[in-house]
Amino acid sequence: MPDPFDLLDRLDRWRHLPDYQLERRADVFFSLYLPEVLGAHFGAAFDPTLVPEFPVRLGLIHGTPSNQSFKVDYLALSADRSALWLVELKTDPGSRNTTQDENMQGAVAAGAAALLQGVVHIARASKHKQKYGHLLAALAGLGLLRVPGDLWDILYPDVRRGLTARLGDIRVAPGVAQMTVRLAYVQPEAHHPGEIGFDTVAAVVERHLDPLSQRFAASLRRWSRVAGSTDPRSLG
């Protein structure tokens, strides 16, 4: 039987390869601990539920009719519902770019209610209505959207007539407009406020004494070093 820890051994080795994108494979490991990491770093409790690949409508950022989007790695929510957090995971410091940072700042300026309404616009325009139904359900579960009760009967198991009208009845929940939108970047090294380095993540993960947590923490400390800079002879 394969050893599940071999997955982390492979990530430790493969991240050094020229075109290997570690963050796409490692994000699920980070997600197990991310609310706790955010809480420890920012000194506030977080809801344990995350929404991955949260879409931000580009038309909202740039003042156009476009329903295209860019994706934020995770949407997180403070436990007291005072703040909505957009969290980006970067395993390579070179993967951050000016356009993405500007879009993220634009999302902050737009505000929480506009971001949630943007998701509804994207869902109405998308051809993948059932997949967006799962996103809408996740956001409703966090108390961010008010969704008509019969929406699910129209969406599943097959899409029925009347869906467009029902999507138009979705409302942003009361109180969302008062939420602050904040940014966090989880990356190998932290240099500015709002950035969380992998060593900091590892320190939180290490509090858990189970074998998986201890093994993941060891990888995090390795991943804090620049990919490719390690002598391959030392990797086994």
Image (cartoon, rainbow, N blue to C red):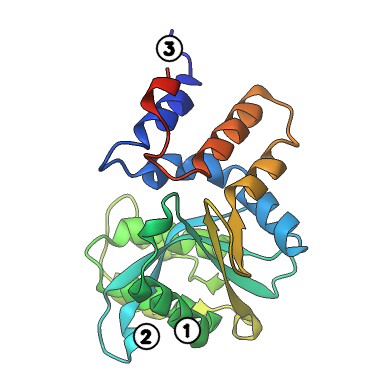
Residue 69 position within the rendered picture, expressed as x and y whole percent measured from the top left:
31, 72
* Residue 224 position in % (x across, y down): 53, 45
Q: Which mark is residue 138?
A: none
Which numbered disc flags the more N-terminal residue, 1 or 3? Answer: 3
Quadrant for the N terminus in the image: top left
Query: Which residue is the site of mark 2?
Result: 60
225, 65: nearer the viewer: 225
Compared with 219, 123 (above or below) is below
Q: Marks 2 and 1: CB-CB under 8 Å?
A: yes
Label 2 or label 3, whichever comes before in sequence order:
3
Element at label 1: helix
**Quarter residue 12 falls in:** top left
From the image, which quarter does the C terminus lie in? top left
Q: Amino acid at mark 3?
A: Pro
Left or right relative to 129: residue 72: right
Distance between the alpha carbons at the discs numbered 1 and 3: 47 Å
**Tag of residue 2:** 3
Label 1 crowding class (10 Å Cα cut-off): few <14, some 14-19, many 20+?
many
Marks 1 and 3: which is nearer the front? 3
Of residues 114 and 95, which is closer to you in this image? 95
Tell me if residue 117 can be seen.
Answer: yes
Image position of 153 (left or right of 196): left
**How many marks do you count on the picture?**
3
Residue to which mark 1 is pinned = 114
Residue 215: x, y in percent?
60, 27
- Residue at the bottom extreme? 63
Q: Quadrant of residue 96?
A: bottom left
Residue drawn 32% across and 79% down?
58
Residue density around tag 3, few if under 14, some if 14–19, many if 20 or more, within 10 Å: few
Name the mark nearer the viewer: 2 or 3: 3
- Separation of residues labelled 2 and 3 (CA atoms): 47 Å
Q: Does the CB distance between marks 1 and 3 fall below 8 Å?
A: no
